[in-house]
Amino acid sequence: MRAHARLVARADGQGGTALVELHGETPLLLRQTPTDGGVATVHLVGGAAGPLAGDDLRLEIEVGPGAAVRVHSVAASIALPGRKGAVSRMAVRAVVHTGATLHWLPEQLVAAAGCAHLAESRIELAAGASLRWRDELICGRYGEAPGGAVVHTQVDYAGRPLLRQSLAVGPHAPGWAGPAVLGGALATGSLLVVDPSLPAGPAAVEGGVARLPLAGGPATLWTATAADAHTLRSHLTG
């Protein structure tokens, strides 16, 4: 299955945000929900199971100067096996202009047994843009070993690299569960906060949570591992 969705937001001139384009195809269906404090809110609704191996799903987001958008999903995304030898792909491309804000806060990605999935995000931030970008990966459903999943995130700020991050889990990623990667944890994720108005705090590690100020912009990256999705979420709500 191939599907494309697009979200374009513009400042409405009255302190709010208008969604001037909101288009989706099954299973990438976009639904506007009540605005929260002037921030336009959109939920991603899965109109079919998956992604299944062989699916190619693409989402484009553009947030114009002064606009603010929050994107959630209504449920976790479960990557499932499909055609033998095929890979499923979910690609997100986001452009956030000067003075704009994007909150990307979907539910978790679950790498079910037998899946082969690539989640790829590329975000371009203009100088003065703000971002909260959360990625969470659950390694298998309850009581099962995970399939193969790769999560890759690329963020540029003011035309310069800010973050390049990749994680691979599953049977074709040697050592992924070892002490150098997840250390036996079944849930992992990150939260990137880019905010020109906030000073970056010092680097810190506590338990399964690490905080790292980034050199390429006004940004802080939190990464976390946990035994389950609930505990992981509690680490990545800051």
Image: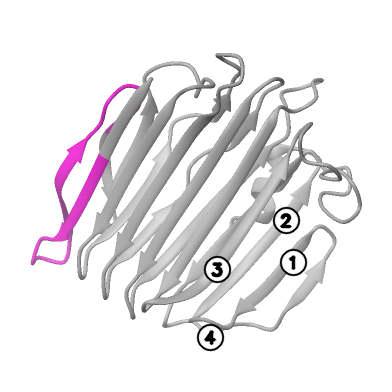
**Image check: 204 left or right of 220?**
right
Gap between marks 3 and 2 measured at Cα: 16 Å
> Which residues make up the magenta segment?
6-30
Coordinates of residue 186 in the picture (x, y in percent) = 79, 38
**Image check: 121 left or right of 202?**
left
Which mark is first along the chain, 4 or 1? 4
Contact? badges 1 and 3 (CB < 8 Å): no
Q: Read off the residue under disc 2.
A: 224
Gap between marks 3 and 4 measured at Cα: 18 Å
Residue at point 24%, 45% (across, down): 7
Which mark is first along the chain, 2 or 3? 3
Q: Read off the residue under disc 3.
A: 163
Q: Amino acid at mark 2?
A: Ala
Which residue is more in the foreground, 137 or 53?
Answer: 53
Query: Does the stretch in magenta take in 18?
Result: yes
**Image check: 66 left or right of 44?**
left
Which mark is first along the chain, 1 or 2? 1
Residue at point 19%, 54% (across, down): 9
Gap between marks 1 and 3 measured at Cα: 15 Å
Magenta stretch: dominant secondary structure? strand
Quadrant in which residue 33 is drawn: top left
Q: Nearer the viewer, mark 1 or mark 3?
A: 3
Which residue is more in the foreground, 159 or 126?
Answer: 159
Contact? badges 3 and 4 (CB < 8 Å): no
Q: Read off the residue under disc 4.
A: 199
Quadrant showing the C terminus: bottom right
- Badge 1 crowding class, 10 Å Cα cut-off, few under 14, some 14 to 19, many 20 or more, is some
Q: Amino acid at mark 4?
A: Pro
Q: Read off the residue under disc 1.
A: 210
Q: Amino acid at mark 1?
A: Ala
